[in-house]
Amino acid sequence: MSTLDRRSFMGRALTFSAVSGFAGATSLASAEQLGILKNANLLVLYRASSSESAAFAASLATAGLDTQALQEDIVRQWRTGLDTEVMQQNKLLLGMGNWDDYTLIKGLAAEARRFPLLAMQHPLKLLEQDWTHDHAQEVLALVKLQDKSQLDRALTALGLRSTLAPQTPSLFSWIIG
């Protein structure tokens, strides 16, 4: 019986999606859908081997959010407790990672009827040194907005920023709820 290497499979899926033009888009929920973020119990997921992802999580940890490093086998991590934590404690997932991380987390969360409210693609090396801290603060401000019109403006501004070509090496940030 053959075994499936998830990372290898996701790498091939990324190649297909880059060729088909799938990667590179920002997806945003409406302000009404993001209303569930108010006073939400958030869990920040990050890839420890990525300095940008770790800095993003560290910035949010400083703001008092719970963080958890993604393990090598995300599916096993999900099945051995992360899914229970998300469902029983009604946590929303906020994170930054590579394409594989985002795709696996999104799919596993969908099994629990949790779907992306925000997904953004970011180039790996931006000109600003501390862009992950700035983005973490931006996401934190987004989840704290109470006024629908302010939330709509913030979502529109975020949507205009994702202009990457599909083959650009990048990270993804997300909110899944």
Image (tube, rainbow, N blue to C red):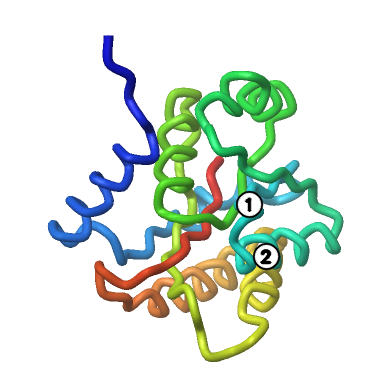
Q: Position of residue 8 (x, y in %)?
A: 33, 40
Q: Label 2: how many residues lie within 10 Å, few (<14), some (14-19) or many (20+)?
A: many
Quadrant of the snapshot with the C terminus: top right
Q: Earlier in the sequence, mark 1 or mark 2?
A: 1
Q: Label 1: how many residues lie within 10 Å, few (<14), some (14-19) or many (20+)?
A: many
Front residue of 137/81: it is 81
Give the labeled residue for mark 2. Answer: 56
Q: Position of residue 138 (x, y in %)?
A: 64, 72
Mark 1: secondary structure: strand
Residue farthest to the bottom?
Answer: 127
> Tag 2: residue type?
Phe
Give the labeled residue for mark 1. Answer: 46
Identify the residue shown where x is 49% and y is 80%. Answer: 125
Identify the residue shown where x is 68% and y is 49%. Answer: 44
**Gap between marks 1 and 2 measured at Cα:** 8 Å
Q: Position of residue 139 (x, y in %)?
A: 63, 65
Quadrant of the snapshot with the N terminus: top left
Identify the residue shown where x is 62% and y is 73%. Answer: 135
> Tag 1: residue type?
Tyr
Front residue of 52/36: it is 52
Q: Which mark is residue 6?
A: none
Badge 1 vs badge 2, beta-carbon distance below 8 Å? yes
Identify the residue shown where x is 60% and y is 52%. Answer: 47
In-image side of 91 versus 127 (left or right): right
